[in-house]
Image (tube, rainbow, N blue to C red):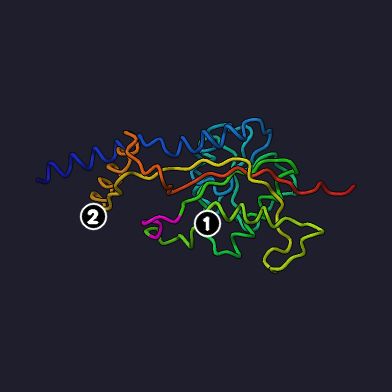
């Protein structure tokens, strides 16, 4: 029995290492940012997205160990806070951030979006990937709350207008952007989650990944998405 569990655990490791769902997400992001000369990756982690263009992408992460790891691989990375980026206004043509926003409270999330819009030039693109509200969202203790796509479309519809005065203080100083593209990640048909040991968790994850590889997914819903925003803020006056 122990030998079978050991083999399943090894198989689980191999399957997880071959999981291409994140790379599919990054490929979609790169399709929209590849024409940008300067790109910022907010919450870069260990630098997976930085591989796409090491000379054009700057990573920023709050964890100094992640930053050192990125530098050891020849990437550009600095320590920084997504809620207070120590970077100049309009200094990047594109901004990317993967699976960060859902760890923030609503007020922090608004600041996070404003900061990305601030450092992105007018007309630039901001691409954000997020987990959605699905059954196992809360298994990660750092998650604060899910933000569905309607959050971005709602903010876009509340842009400044002479005919439409502000009715909600939260919309004051709202970043100006327009959603121009979205990609959904479909969950496995049956979500395995076996608790009790790390090996069981790995086997569960491997079974979920295998389902996705063989297109056994719930195509009528999604567990994550990537949204592309065009920065519509006005250029600074001369």
Residue 197 tag number:
2
Residue 83, picture quadrant: bottom right
Q: Residue at x 69, y 48 (%)?
A: 177
Q: Which residue is mark 1?
A: 147
Q: Residue at x 67, y 33 (%)?
A: 36
Residue 183 in the image: x percent, y percent?
A: 51, 40
Q: Residues within 10 Å of mark 1 (few under 14, many from 20)?
A: some
Residue 93, picture quadrant: top right
Between disc 1 and disc 2, the foreground one is: 1
Left or right? Give the position of 99 relative to 234: left
Q: Residue at x 65, y 56 (%)?
A: 155
User: Is label 2 in a helix, a strand or a loop?
Assistant: loop
Residue 204 in the image: x percent, y percent?
A: 27, 47
Left or right? Give the position of 6 relative to 115: left
What residue range appears in magenta?
133-138
Residue 65 in the image: x percent, y percent?
A: 49, 49
Q: Residues within 10 Å of mark 2 (few under 14, many from 20)?
A: few
- What secondary structure is the stretch in magenta mostly built from? loop
* Upstream in sequence: badge 1 or badge 2: 1
Residue nearest the viewer, comparing 2 with 115: 115
User: Please, is residue 209 above or below residue 102 in the view?
Assistant: above
How far is mark 1 from mark 2, CA to CA? 30 Å
The answer to whether marks 1 and 2 mark residues whose Cβ atoms lie closer than 8 Å is: no
Residue 96 in the image: x percent, y percent?
A: 59, 43
């Amino acid at each position: 029995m122990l030998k079978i569990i050991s083999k399943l655990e090894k198989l689980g490791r191999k399957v997880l290492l071959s999981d291409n769902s994140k790379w599919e997400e990054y490929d979609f992001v790169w399709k929209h940012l590849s024409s940008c000369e300067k790109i910022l990756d907010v919450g870069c982690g260990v630098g997976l997205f930085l591989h796409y263009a090491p000379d054009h992408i700057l990573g920023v992460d709050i964890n100094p160990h992640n930053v050192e790891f990125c530098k050891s691989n020849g990437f550009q990375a600095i320590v920084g806070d997504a809620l207070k980026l120590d970077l100049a206004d309009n200094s990047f043509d594109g901004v990317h951030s993967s699976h960060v926003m859902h760890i923030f409270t609503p007020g922090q999330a608004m600041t996070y979006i404003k900061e990305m819009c601030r450092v992105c030039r007018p007309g630039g693109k901001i691409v954000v990937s997020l987990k959605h509200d699905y059954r196992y969202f809360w298994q990660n203790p750092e998650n604060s709350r899910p933000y569905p796509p309607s959050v971005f479309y709602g903010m876009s519809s509340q842009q400044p207008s002479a005919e439409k005065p502000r009715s909600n203080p939260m919309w004051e100083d709202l970043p100006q952007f327009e959603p121009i593209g979205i990609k959904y990640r479909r969950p496995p048909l049956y979500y395995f989650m076996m608790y009790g040991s790390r090996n069981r968790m790995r086997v569960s994850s491997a079974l979920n990944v295998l389902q996705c590889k063989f297109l056994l997914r719930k195509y009528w819903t999604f567990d994550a998405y990537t949204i592309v925003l065009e920065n519509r803020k006005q250029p600074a006056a001369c």
